Image (cartoon, rainbow, N blue to C red):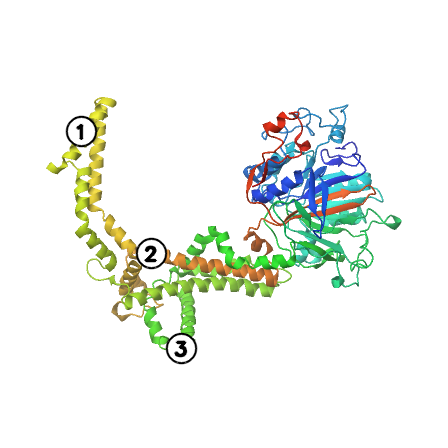
Amino acid sequence: SSSTSDLDLAGCVFDESSSSPELWFDFMADCGDGFNSSYQVARVLADPNLTVLTHDRGDRKTLPRGEFLVIGGDLAYPDPSPDTFEKRFFRTFEDALPPPPCYRKEAISTKKPNLANTGWANIFKEPVEDPNDPDEVLEKYKGPKAYILPGNHDWFDGLSTYTRLVLSRDWLGGWLIPHERSYFAIALPHGWHMLGVDLALSEDIDLEQFKFLADYCERRVGEDDAVVVMTHEPYWVIDDQEARKDEDCAESNLRELMETHLAGKVRARLAGDLHHYTRHVPVKRGVPTTSGSFDADVNATYSAGTASFLAEKARKIGRKTRGGRVASEPAPAGSPGARNVEENLPELIVSGGGGAFLHPTHTFAKDIKVNFGGSNNKPYTRTCAYPSETACYRLSWLNIWQFRWRNWRLDFLWGFLYLGISSSLLPLCGIYASYVESAYSKGALAHLEWYLGQIASLVVDVFRTGHISLILLPATVIALYNLCEEGTGLGPKKRLVWGCSHGVAHVIAALSSALFIEFVTEWSTTTGIVTTMHSGADAGNQTTLGHSLYDTYSENFAEVFEMVTPTMFTQQGGSDAAGRLGAEKLLSFASTESVEGVGSVLFQITYDTLSVGGAWMAQNLPLFKGLMILFDLPGLIGTKHAAMCQKLCEGGAECLGSKDPLLFAQVTRWTIGTYIACVSAVFFVLAIPMAGAIFGTWLAITLNVFNVQYNEGFSSLRIQHWKNFLRMHITKNGDLEIYGIGLDRVPKSWVKDEKWDGSQKAKAKRERDTPSFMWSRPSTLHVG
């Protein structure tokens, strides 16, 4: 229960040590993303008794629901708005374990815990003598509780949404929220303690937290006690991944706290942020870290109908060893890791699989050095990864062919970018003639030489005569270089080469698209496949095919429309009797049904206006002619291209790559605009798949060769499977057992559970005010 008598800060100190000699509790992080994955994890957490397959899949084990749930941050993606919190965080937990009848999302809690009028019965283990004593109320409450840390995503708005919707509410579904601050300390049985700290966006705890935690350690943590420290980000792997120097490593204040006030007492560290499961253990100096590990990586299958399985063997951590020193329980005798364990150092566990998209495990080093202050670096090795490195390596290659369709919203960006890079070069007058002269009758090497020469020439032309292209081409290379991350596998020099190569690949693809379209345009017009009209009164405005289609319409179908149009929109001639009769009926209706006088006049004016306007549009707007010409897009592109080149190459001027500004000024804006518009329609079809394939291939290679871009490379795939969380158990003899629960597959179809205990039919068979945490089937939906 909340104990504030000996500490200054209220609402952040809790005691779970007196409930029973053993305790079950859960840890989960990074939950509020897609509904399928987030709800599946919440549903499993809410299950009163979770049946799991053992690590080797040979047996089953039943684990009771945790008496409290600790959530390690990043509650809703991608931003901490009230809408995303409601839909992606609160809703999933409310569907998994419904809140009490008294719950209103608009309510603001002024006193915690608020259990006075929940609408539930039998929520206390025994009668509460003093309802105003929060210690006693929480101690005797028998329902599950939730302690919720904020993550970096939750800090994007300065923690305002988290404060309003988490700290100011009493319930997360059926879990009671007792804390009032973004950090907390929980006393557990047998001298165990859990410290939940808030690193905000500064990668460290602030002075207020440091003083609070130091005071808590001094007053509450005994000499032989053990501590679990929980943060959102696992900087033990992030610092290594980003190759940070000792002085640049995160958590300097937190390290100072652990090295002084908690010296030798931190038995485990938990974190989320990375959306997978890993566990690192310390190794002795001088012992090769590749000599073995406690558990092999897991690559298992999962049926959506089954509950879950153990991602690795249950990890048992002892509270203390000889002489009062705290240490990890050694591996069984004879196991490869038995001689490698370094005493008095914490095990480091990442479990960020609460619902967000999957992160890979293979991009992070297996053997790392963890900074414990100054130059005090300790060697650690990873003993388990879920999903396995092999599985993540294979998933990374999906970017090559799946990046584009999974991220189709980028299509227009790619199209406009590629068109912008090439726009200043169009049209490429004489490109086909250049090909015939240089490579047509020669071998493959001559073709390649011509192609590369043209690309190089186009790049030079961009810097010599470009406008929009001159801005977009270097901007593309610079932007994609900045996108490329630096890490242990990609140093500064490699990053410069690899990042710029990515940008250059897109530039070459954009210029190749322009070269191909212009080449095909001139080839098709030169060979007569597409004929154009670029002389006479219609120069540059029609195509032969479009003009022929319109002539066919005029000869065979125009009479029909000429007969219909006057009847509908005019009142002239004897053949317009039907039209006049219709108008008289409308006028008669208006006179009798609406206001007399003014109504009739207004109706007549409106009718006359529509008649005259409709007749003029039908007779004067070249609607059909425009549609016919637009139908012949290749002919229209060829016609505009020929019209522009006729001006640019006037007098025998060299116009390929050297557009004379004076000649270019003679081309009308209408011609240029329609030409670019028509070319863009073809350009987008050609450029978008190329851009997606290049970016996806670059991501796949960057992931699997250089082991960086883990966030971009897997957020693009949006993989919702391979979720995980921790179920922890403090045994009667004081050991801490940690079960890594893995969910290989997430259901994609849900239906209402007909046997749901919250239905009217179920309520009729029992007391209506039975708390949801006492239901055997508390979740509203099940797998469809």
Looking at the rendered structure, the secondary structure element under dot 3 is loop
Amino acid carrying mark 1 in the image: Glu
Residue 450: mark in rendering? none
Judging by the rendered image, the residue that carries numbered circle 3 is 443
Q: Name the amino acid, label 3.
A: Gly
In the image, residue 126 above or below residue 450: above
Comparing labels 2 and 1, the label whose residue is closer to the camera: 1
**Mark number, residue 584:** 1
Look at the image and tell me whether residue 253 can be seen.
no
Q: Secondary structure at mark 1?
A: helix
Q: Position of residue 262 (x, y in %)?
A: 79, 46
| Residue located 70% across and 53% down the image | 236
Separation of residues labelled 1 and 3 (CA atoms): 79 Å
User: From mark 3 to mark 2, how far is it between C-alphas?
Assistant: 34 Å
Q: Is residue 234 left or right of residue 376?
A: left
In the image, farthest residue toward the right? 323
Q: Quadrant of residue 248?
A: bottom right
Among numbered discs 1 and 3, the one appearing first in the sequence: 3
Label 2 vs label 1: CA separation? 47 Å
Q: Are marks 1 and 3 in contact (CB under 8 Å)?
A: no
- Name the residue type under label 2: Cys
Label annotation for residue 678: 2
**Quadrant occupied by the N terminus:** top right
**In the drawing, does residue 717 fall left or right of residue 660?**
right
* Coordinates of residue 293 in the picture (x, y in percent): 75, 58
Q: Residue at x 41, y 72 (%)?
A: 453
Name the one closer to the observer, 585 or 671: 585
Q: Earlier in the sequence, mark 3 or mark 2?
A: 3
Circle 2/circle 1 CB separation < 8 Å: no
Q: Is residue 449 visible?
A: yes
